[in-house]
Amino acid sequence: MNNLSGTIPPEISNLTSLIYLDLSINQISGTIPPEIGLLTRLQTLHIFDNHLNGSIPEEIGYIRSLTEISLSTNSLNGSIPASLGNLNNLSHLYVYDNHLSGSIPAEIGKLANLVKAHLEINQLTGHIPPEIGDLTNAKLFYGYSNELFGPIPAEIGKMRSLQNLSLFSNYLSGPIPKPIGDLTELKLLDLYATQLSGPIPSELGKLKNLNDLELSNNQLTGSIPSSFGNLRNLQTLFLGNNNLTDEIPSSFCNLTSLTLLYLLKNNLKGKILQCLGNISGLQYVIMSHNNLSGELPSSICNLTSLQVLVLDRNNLMEAIPQCFGNVSRHLEVHNNLSGTLPTTFCIGSALKSFNLHGNKLEGKIPRSLKNCKELQVVDLGDNLLNDTFPMWLGTLPELRVLSLKSNKLHGPIRTSNLRSLLQ
């Protein structure tokens, strides 16, 4: 990194013995001169993080010795030149964060030694070429945040070395291709917000090395495959904002590495699995806006790492387990819960948001809430609580939001801290 400015001179082509060229992280502007194609011995070309504009010259495709190209974080436009398909030795291609348009050239499939392809954060359009399946040595393919459309080609299942596949935020259509289940080395599969439809293929249950699965914000239908129980290494599972139905499969009990479970805004039904309480590393459980029913399982109290529990907009009933007061930093349940509030909030509790708005809870507001010194939000509105106004909440130093409306509270409000919150 220096503070170089100005343009890349065409005379750079005179350096015919040059093997390594790195001009990255400067303030170089202008275009990449086509004369760069005369550097026939060049192996590494790094000009990332500058102010380059114009197109990628097709002459770069004449430098057969190239193993790495990094042109990311510039203002390059135009298309990815098909001539790059000539670079048989290329292992790393980084052109992300530019203004590239046009389609991904089919010639990319000729890059037999390509290991990493970063095409993300551009304006690429068109279909993903089926020739992508010929990249059998590729470990990473990122095409997210573009304008790609059409189906994901089934040929993608031939990329057997792939570990990271991210295509989120595109305009793809059709189903998730079943051959993705053949990518058994895959650790990350991110298809968030790609407009995919149809059922989730059970073949995804073969991805036993998968750590992160992101399928939220699509139009997926049908059941969650029970084969997901085979994903023993799965840490984050995002299935929210789809049209999934039926019950959460009992095979989820096998997901012992899970830290985040995100199922909100589907049409899931049935009970919350008791066995979730045995997944000791769970930190985030978000299952709001479904049709889940039954009672809250007391086993959730075993989740000592839990930070966020959001179950609102379901059909849950029965009482709240007393232990709930100390299992989460963010507790949110709007249903038909009855009974009384938990009474044992321990000193040192990390609870920051306590939201049980819109239930049928009765009794008093537990005095032990004053032990929760990190509380910022308390919303117990629209319940059946019958108590004097909890002036003692004024001792909570971080409290920012207090809602107790539509209960049966009585008595004066004398604490100035609470007066300001209620104004």
Image (cartoon, helix red, strand yellow):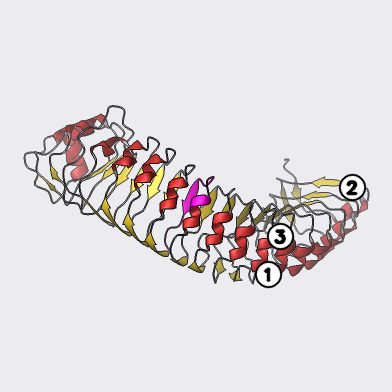
Amino acid type at image mark 3? Asn
Task: Name the residue that disc number 1 marks.
Answer: 103
- Where residue 152 sits, quadrant-wise, is bottom right
Amino acid type at image mark 1? Ser
Q: Position of residue 184 (x, y in %)?
A: 63, 53
Question: Tag 2's secondary structure?
Answer: loop
Asked whether, in this view, residue 329 is left or right of residue 362, the answer is right
Residue 18 disc label: 2
Residue 245 disc label: none
Asked whether, in this view, residue 92 is left or right of residue 316, the answer is right
Q: Position of residue 323 (x, y in %)?
A: 26, 36
Q: Residue at x 38, y 56 (%)?
A: 264
In depth, the one of 118 and 74 nearer the eye is: 118
Crowd class of label 2 (few under 14; some 14 to 19; many from 20; radius 10 Å): some
Mark toward the start of the polypeptide (3 vs 1): 3
391 to 83, vertically: above or below: above
User: Which of the image's four quarters has the N terminus?
Assistant: top right
Determine if residue 252 is in view. Answer: yes
Task: Name the residue that disc number 3 marks.
Answer: 53
Q: Which residues, given as a range, are shown in magenta?
A: 229-241
**Nearer the camera: disc 3 or disc 1:** 1
* C-alpha gap between disc 3 and disc 1: 19 Å
110 to 67, vertically: above or below: below
* C-alpha gap between disc 2 and disc 1: 32 Å
Amino acid type at image mark 2? Leu
